[in-house]
Amino acid sequence: MNIRKILFVKEIVEADAGERAARPISRVAAIAVITNPLAGSYQADVSPLFDIGLALGERLAAQAVALLDGPALSYGKSAIVGVSGELEHAAALLHPKLGRTMRNAVGGGEAIIPSTKKVAAAGATIDVPLSNKDNIWSFNELDTITVMVPDGPRPDEIVAILAFADGGRPLARSGEGPVTT
């Protein structure tokens, strides 16, 4: 794995819509800009990215969780593939092995880890979805953190993002489960 740079973004949300939150909510994104070993031509076997995802998670997940102000309540992951790569490269990086490291970092995690992915040029933004680590139906934790890397991804790179939060939306009041009519 060839890492060009690692960034950590932390935001603390204290208010929304002119109202103070019951408590500040911290969100952290760990971002790695890596060389895409599959960039440049179609390859049927994307499995080399599986272990890269595992290695990124082992390196970044616990560090990101440690930057939160409270225990991790939600998580999510995303990737931006440079234009010489393809969408499946993001899926291969994010899904087969990365999630296990994120669950280990939060001390469990019963719910699916939401994700987004896209192919884009350097400087593209991506909304990393966040959801409750144990209950996908906990609507109050459905949220996002928006991130970008000004000089990445270059055409032969991938920007990988692991995100965690210690709370949901600051003024959440949409409920805790499915609403039926």
Image (cartoon, rainbow, N blue to C red):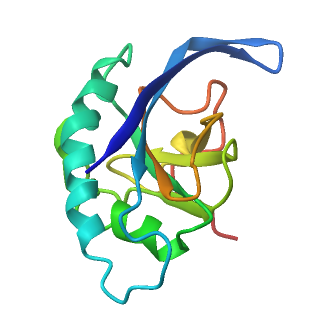
Q: Is residue 96 visible?
A: no
Q: Nearer the viewer, residue 140 or 70?
A: 70
Place of residue 113 in the rendered image (x, y in percent of width and height, measured from the top left): 39, 56
21 with respect to 68 (left or right): right
Task: Provide residue 88's location: percent of width, then percent of height.
Answer: 47, 76
* Rendered image quadrant of residue 94: bottom left
Q: Outermost residue toward the front?
A: 40
Give percent across and percent down for residue 38. 39, 71
- The image shows residue 145, relative to residue 99, as above or below, that is above
Q: Residue furthest bottom?
A: 44
Report how many numbered discs are placed on residues in the image: 0
Q: Residue at x 62, y 24 (%)?
A: 170
Give x and y (percent) for residue 150. 65, 33
Q: Tell me: 146 left or right of 42.
A: right
- Relative horizontal placement of residue 122, taking residue 93 as reference (left or right): right
User: What residue sits 50% from the left and 73% below the top?
Assistant: 40
Viewer-proximal residue, 62 or 37? 37
Residue 22 makes an appearance in the image:
yes
Residue occupying the point 62% across, 64% down: 83
In percent of the image, x 58 and y 13: which residue is there?
22
The correct choice, above or below, for 168 with respect to 137 in the image is: above
> Which quadrant, please, contains the C terminus?
bottom right
Nearest the viewer among 24 and 128 is: 128
